[in-house]
Image (spheres, rainbow, N blue to C red):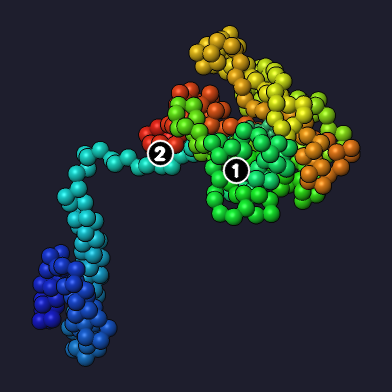
């Protein structure tokens, strides 16, 4: 037998024991185009005596096929081994670690629902700054200059010099955005105004010094109290369900006349009376009214020609009713175990 054939057969037998780097080297040493031993043998066939050429040639070609198959098999085996090694030391019976996923805050959920309902009625979103002047927060809205709400005890004033529109303060409601929108003068107006407001209130189960409001405003020719009632009744049914009853009680705000508060039938007891509605069967949801002519005039709008309605509500209260949250502070404590439950 040709001496190279015997040597190559031995090398072939060792392939299944080679490591990754050795395998690479052996591939080159046997089948490499320039220096491979088997390649050299195949090239040298033509120089062999005719009687050897046939037998050696057949054997060399079989070896080439065997080497190729052996290298492939070893490569696959090494890859599988590396995959298993990556799992060594991993306890596959250990329970998985829970992943924390974000969720929307209950107040955000209510805000999104409220704005979506009014978007369906053609209202667009408007916003304003949280630092406002006395004029925008109070006086343009027809508060008399000695109104108790303007007192230092109720309102957070920012200090510093008074500007042309009075002292600066943290807005106590979203109504100053009514003035901002109206004095731009583009009529008709239909806006929904979500925002943060500030009051010098104690932080207890039902009050917070920082909370949220959603304001609405519609001004056009020919708007009447009927439009206010129909719009807000539609809103209440869209938010609380089609069988919700609404009632309007006379109220007072300096910037609306007439003014009202809207109640909806308690969604917990269906109107029969329970602890949540203090036995009345009704829940107060929002304040509303026809925009006071003085407010329109303060914004450069002719109150003889234009009329409108406005309303304001607190999404915290609605969220507390909706989700049965007994203490407003739970909405601000930032406890993810609590906040993660709502959506
Ligand atoms: N701004 C009023 C408040 O904070 C709510 C309100 C808005 C009432 C618009 C009537 C119209 O209490």
From this viewpoint, is residue 342 visible? no
Q: Residue at x 55, y 39 (%)?
A: 152
Instruction: Using the rendered view, name the quadrant where residue 137 is placed.
Output: top right
The answer to whether residue 78 is left or right of residue 121 is: left
Q: Which of the two discs, 2 and 1, sits closer to the camera?
A: 1
Viewer-nearest residue: 175 or 233 = 175
Viewer-nearest residue: 6 or 305 = 305
Residue 10: percent from left, percent from top: 10, 72
How far apart are the alpha carbons under marks 2 and 1?
Answer: 24 Å
Q: Which residue is mark 1?
A: 171
The quarter of the rendered structure image containing the N terminus is bottom left
Q: Which residue is mark 2?
A: 334
The answer to whether residue 334 is left or right of residue 64 is: right
Quadrant position of ligand 1: top right
Task: Please tell me whether residue 121 is drawn above or below residue 29 in the rendered image.
Answer: above
Instruction: Using the rendered view, name the quadrant where residue 139 is placed.
Output: top right
Ligand 1 is within 8 Å of the C-beta of the residue at disc 1: no
Circle 1 sits in a helix, a strand or a loop, which is it? loop
User: In the image as oriented, which residue stretches furthest toward the top?
Assistant: 272
User: In the image as oriented, which residue stretches furthest toward the right?
Assistant: 305
Task: Please tell me whether residue 93 is drawn above or below residue 56 in the rendered image.
Answer: above
Residue 95: percent from left, percent from top: 25, 38
Q: Residue at x 70, y 19 (%)?
A: 249
Viewer-nearest residue: 7 or 264 = 264
Q: Earlier in the sequence, mark 2 or mark 1?
A: 1
């Amino acid at each position: 037998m040709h001496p190279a054939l015997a040597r190559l057969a031995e090398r072939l037998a060792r392939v299944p024991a080679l490591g990754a780097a050795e395998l690479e080297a052996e591939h080159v040493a046997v089948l490499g185009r320039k220096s491979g031993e088997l390649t050299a043998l195949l090239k040298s066939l033509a120089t062999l005596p005719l009687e050897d050429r046939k037998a050696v040639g057949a054997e060399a070609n079989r070896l080439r096929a065997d080497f190729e198959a052996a290298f492939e098999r070893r490569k696959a085996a090494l890859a599988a081994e590396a995959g298993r090694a990556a799992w060594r030391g991993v306890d596959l019976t250990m329970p998985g670690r829970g992943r924390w996923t974000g969720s929307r805050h209950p107040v955000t959920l209510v805000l999104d629902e409220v704005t979506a309902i009014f978007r369906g009625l053609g209202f667009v979103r408007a916003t304003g700054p949280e630092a406002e002047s006395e004029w925008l927060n109070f006086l343009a809205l027809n508060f008399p200059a000695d109104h108790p709400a303007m007192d230092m005890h109720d309102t957070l004033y920012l200090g510093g010099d008074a500007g042309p529109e009075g002292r600066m303060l943290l807005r106590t409601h979203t109504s100053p955005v009514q003035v901002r929108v109206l004095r731009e003068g583009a009529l008709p107006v239909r806006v929904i105004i979500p925002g943060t407001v500030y009051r010098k209130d104690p932080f207890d189960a039902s009050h917070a010094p920082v909370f949220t409001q959603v304001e609405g405003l519609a001004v056009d020719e020919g708007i009447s109290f009927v439009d206010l009632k129909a719009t807000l009744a539609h809103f209440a049914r869209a938010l609380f369900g089609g069988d919700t009853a609404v009632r309007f009680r006379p109220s007072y705000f300096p910037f609306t006349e007439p003014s009202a508060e809207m109640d909806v039938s308690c969604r917990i007891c269906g109107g029969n009376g329970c602890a949540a509605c203090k036995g009345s069967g009704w829940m107060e949801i929002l304040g509303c009214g026809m925009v006071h002519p003085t407010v329109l005039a303060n914004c450069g709008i002719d109150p003889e020609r234009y009329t409108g309605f406005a309303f304001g509500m607190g999404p915290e209260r609605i969220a507390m009713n909706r989700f049965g949250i007994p203490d407003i502070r739970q909405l601000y404590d930032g406890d993810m175990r609590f906040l993660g439950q709502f959506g």
